Amino acid sequence: KSDVMLQIFKLIETVAPTDVNILITGESGTGKELIARSIHARSKRQAKPFVPMNCGALPENLFESELFGYEKGAFTGADQTKIGLFEYANKGTFFLDEVCEMNHSVQTKFLRVLQERELRRLGGHIQIPVNVRIISATNRSPDTILDDDSLRADLYYRLNVVHIHIPPLRERKGDIQLLAAHFLKKAMVTTNKKKLQFAAETISLLESYNWPGNVRELENVVERSVALCNDIIILPADLPIQLQQVEPNHERFDSMSFKQARSKVIEKVEKRFLVFLLRKHRGNITRVAEEAEMTRRNAYRLLQKHSINP
């Protein structure tokens, strides 16, 4: 629901039906491949293959044969013809993860394939036509890609027709509770546990943590907490120790006005006070409203505002 993610979703809807190449940047664990798959699923190529390739996972001597394939007898051990991943993605989408890890000699050949829309397998002589949309991803910032010479400039501009940057989770903390609830539902299915929910203090710790591993780390933390929880409420004690040591509700004031800071403090006190009254009266809204000296209608409005389940 964060503004930056809503803008990304809007951009995906705009570019998905086209065939332009896309470069996705963002820290590890932010969901770059998920965005790439989302683009493919909304494109006119959706019925054709989505083929991912991690450029940092293959040894340099195997990279070219995996990418372009090889003919029988091309090298020792090549006892049959094998099509490469790029050819397999024909008429579909090819996802180059960690594209900056591709060595320069392969970059040169890959650029030629993109320009000519044809490839030649290792040991082969026939030019094979290919029609592939390229989505690339890297955890490096666009400003440094050309400076450190990790990508050839002509290849970079060929891949970066449209740029999508996914912000780290610490910069969109309003999404943490939504994502945690999503991962909680998934974890309850795999562990066969039912009706689990987070304590308010647990959510506060999740929202205060810096998440260096981003969304992937959040998913792992929720999965671990569900496995360790022996009650229907996931408490701070069920979280990893590094989250338990976080000071909750720590705010950065350099990016907000006094009015915004005051509003945040009021909201947090409201939420904590409501949770306190709900526990005290075991979810009885009438008694909560009476003690808080407000109408039931106002009590329900505040509960909805703070996403509190009585």
Image (cartoon, rainbow, N blue to C red):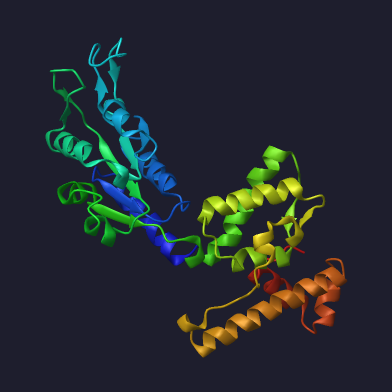
Quarter of the rendering containing residue 53: top left
**Horizontal relation, residue 37 to residue 170: left or right:** left
Residue at point 77% right, 80% down?
A: 295
**Going by the picture, which residue comes out furthest to the bottom?**
258
Note whether residue 257 is visible.
Answer: yes
Note whether residue 235 is visible.
Answer: no
- Pick the front one: 112 or 135: 112
Q: Position of residue 287 (x, y in %)?
A: 86, 75
Numbered marks: total:
0
Residue 306 vertical placement versus 196 (above, below)? below
Q: Position of residue 26 (x, y in %)?
A: 39, 56
Residue 135 vertical placement versus 266 (above, below)? above
Q: Position of residue 160 (x, y in %)?
A: 24, 51
Residue 283 vertical placement versus 30 (above, below)? below
**Horizontal relation, residue 2 to residue 230: left or right:** left
Which quarter shows the C terminus? Answer: bottom right
Residue at point 28% right, 48% down?
A: 22
Residue at point 29% right, 25% down?
A: 84
Quarter of the rendering containing residue 242: bottom right
Residue at point 67% right, 68% down?
A: 304
Q: Position of residue 38 (x, y in %)?
A: 41, 44
